[in-house]
Amino acid sequence: MRPSTRQLLVGGQPANLGSRAFDVLSALIAHRERMLTKNELLEMVWPNLVVEENNLQVHVSALRKLLGPKAIVTIPGRGYRFAAALDALPALAAVAAVAASAGAPASSPRGAPMASAARALRSDTGNLPALLPPLLGRDAELAMLRELVLQQHRLLSLLGPGGIGKTSLARAAARQVAHDFRDGAWMVELASISDPAALPGAVALALSINLPGRADASVELAERLRGHELLVLDNCEHLIEPVAALVGYLLEAVPKLHVLVTSQEPLKLATERPVRLGALAVPDHAVLADAATHGAVALFVARVGAMQPGFRLDEGNLDAVVDICRELDGLPLALELAAARVPLLGVQGVRQHLAQRLHVLKSGVRDAPSRHRTLRTTLDWSHALLSPDEQKVFRRLGVFVGGFGLELAQQVASDESIDIWAVLDHLGNLVDKSIVVVDAGPVPRYRLLETARVYAREQLEAASEWDSLRQWHARCMQSALDRRVRAGHLGAETVDQWVLACSPEIDNLRSAIEWACGPGGDAALALDLVNIAAVLMYQAGRYPECLRWMLMAEPLIDEATPAQVVAEFSLGLALVGLHGGISAQRRMQLLDRACDIFERQPPHGLLALTLCSNAYVAAVSGDFDSAERRLAQCRELVEQPGLRPFKGTWLYCTGMVRRYQDQPVQALSAFSQALPLVRSEGNARTLFHVLNNLAAMHHELGHVDEAVAQFRGLIDHLQRSPLADAQMMAFALNWYAHALTGQGALEEAQAQVLRSLPHCRRSVGLRHFAGMLALLAARQGRLREAALLIGCDDAARQRRGERRSPSDDRAMAAALALIGAAHPAASIEAWRLEGAGLDEDAIMALVSERHLLNAASGPHVRAA
């Protein structure tokens, strides 16, 4: 076989073989140690084309006629394997003889004639295979790497963790640019080399260069390199210093030489151009049309399809496939190993077993390097390259969930032998060695890939550090977050500043709370953590999650719990239970208890916040006497010099009480006075509520066009704000839709409701807006749906223990008037009862676009 001329000689004579048949044979020979599936062969020989399987069978039959019936073995239903023995020696002798007869010199700078013959046999582009497996999901990286090689970067380092796909990408890039180098591109595999002294010999062997051994091996290698080639030094991390020394010398001694290195850490040479390879793209959401375009999904589906012909991504397996890709961080090796388990476990089974991934993900392809046969061996390889102190810091970082900041990493990973500055150094080394990933931003954050985190936890357990480190992690979380909250109370930071700083640690906060509340936890620490969490999660708009934490911690309160802790817990639980988590009556009890405790202490901001919250809850419950009393107490409090920053919050709550008292003019005045004060405080959540209610007051006063304009401005503001969250968007969009309904723009109102659905799913739910949606449905002629939504609103308010505001009552009356004009009272009552039992999914379906299309011709929109 002559790859350079794409010829097959049979009996010394060129065989009549088409180009596709030659490609089939090349692929089978290149992968002769294993079976190639039909899908793999089709992808290699007809990339990006849809080809019938019988085309492959035709070419295999033609090859068998030339090579004999046993040269290619068929594995029924699976694929083919090249089975003939390969004997290169006669061919080498023949090539040498041809060279000699043509007057070629007996030796060359490359060495003996046999070496030249060996190089001639391989191809005119070096020692890379003529055909490579498809490289999925790396088009952008491949194009970038190719351009960098051709832009005269003489030393490129392709960096990344084990299993990220560095070798495959480097090989593909080298294959594409090989023709741009006179002597092609040459791959040198270094993983099996353990002795630094053997490095020059390994490079020489790959290039078929003879080193006489009379002088220094590096010098002899440089003398025999022509320099018109690209060297790819693969897997250098375990010999990083000797490789750096050799590469530095060769680049200086051989001016036209180019080197591409793959490694887990850079060589740190002055001329080096590092390129850090990220994971394959993983979709954010499981949408069939979009998911398959992401590299991780494409690779997983292709590998499963190679083992299970006919496997396709569809609605039935989409969620599981996307979850697998996400859980495995888009790591190609992990995806390959996961795909290999699908024939045994099924896609759902693989997803279910990912918690035990280090045990499950093994048995890869036979021709993979030994360090890539299982996920564990890959991690063992990387872990063994770390110093003992780096190993200690690495495993301790495994206690973090979802990333971590530098300060927390220093606190958690340090001990009596490794101080915080040593942790900083070791963390930098772990980043260099691709063990820790840096997420760039104004303040860098760090994380372990999830598989590495699972491995680090195993190392913690093996070192008997897991339990003690979880406790220490929880204490460090409490200390770090408490400092930020106290800084906010002292005015050193605005609320927005500390929320932005602390929000990235919510995953770690959750983990700390779960440990502290669980068996072997710490009750006092748990209460401190959930009290901090309530402040943070309220401002972050993540009420339901924090409510679960606080209800989990509530049984830990006993007679020994300090009164201040009880008061903060009561206030926090009332705040995060604001939108239906707990009833208004229970919130009043909690706030009354907090007030009683805070009033026995020197006046401070928590008392002002509690009084304001108490007044609001009393108003929505219809207890206006209590609301007025708490507002009066708070007014006196916020006039004191140290508490004046809370005046904006007091004015906002005053406006809310006036709304429920049906005093829209006074409410508008209070919100208008609050706006500049709240804006100057740097409190995005209260500012949002003020702006939202200002627009709502214009709507109630009949200034509908002004209300619509203000809601549009508010939504634009949220889209630009880094502190906007799903809850804010859910409220703004649905109130905007309500104003549009009042304006008569029903199609636009419906569009805004649909736009709000993903935000509602992630926050308070669509049921919270059922009353407003009922009026929209009624004006659209969807009268039964309107009655169902009214029933849903009835039930939701009853559960929350809240009354409707006067404006809500007027909207409800308008909707009922439209329904009542077409349907009897008995039908309306039955629909309201039915609506009371609808869950969130049913409400979503009721207002979705698909339902509207079905409803347009349904009998329920016409009069009975």
Image (cartoon, rainbow, N blue to C red):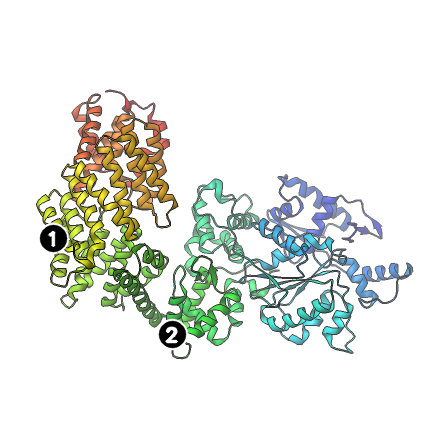
Q: Quadrant of the N terminus?
A: bottom right
Question: Mark number for residue 673?
Answer: none
Badge 1 is on which residue?
633
Q: Which mark is residue 464?
A: 2
Dot 2 lies on which element? loop
**Split into 4 quadrants, where in the image is the C terminus?**
top left
Within 10 Å of the Cα at label 1, are there few (<14), some (14-19), or many (20+) other Cα atoms?
A: some
> Can see residue 723?
yes
In-front residue for pair 233/739:
739
Where residue 847 appears, as percent x and y from the top left, is 32, 33
Front-most of residues 270 and 364: 270
Tell me which corner region of the image, top left, top right, bottom left or bottom right, holds residue 641.
bottom left
The disc labelled 1 sits on which kind of residue? Gln
Q: Residues within 10 Å of mark 2 (few under 14, many from 20)?
A: few
Residue 144 in picture, x, y percent from top left: 61, 52
Q: Position of residue 626 (x, y in %)?
A: 9, 48
Up the image or down, 256 lies above or below 797; here it is below
In space, the residues marked 2 and 1 are separated at their CA atoms by 55 Å
Q: Secondary structure at mark 1?
A: helix
Q: Residue at 40% of width from left, 59% of height from top?
A: 402
Residue 732 in picture, x, y percent from top left: 31, 40
Question: Of 583 and 721, which appears nearest the observer?
Answer: 721
Q: Is residue 788 left or right of residue 423?
A: left
Circles 2 and 1, Cβ within 8 Å, touching? The answer is no
The one of 847 and 812 positioned closer to us in this rendering: 812
Identify the mark nearer the N-term, 2 or 1: 2
Nearer the camera: disc 2 or disc 1: 1
Left or right of 179, for residue 821: left
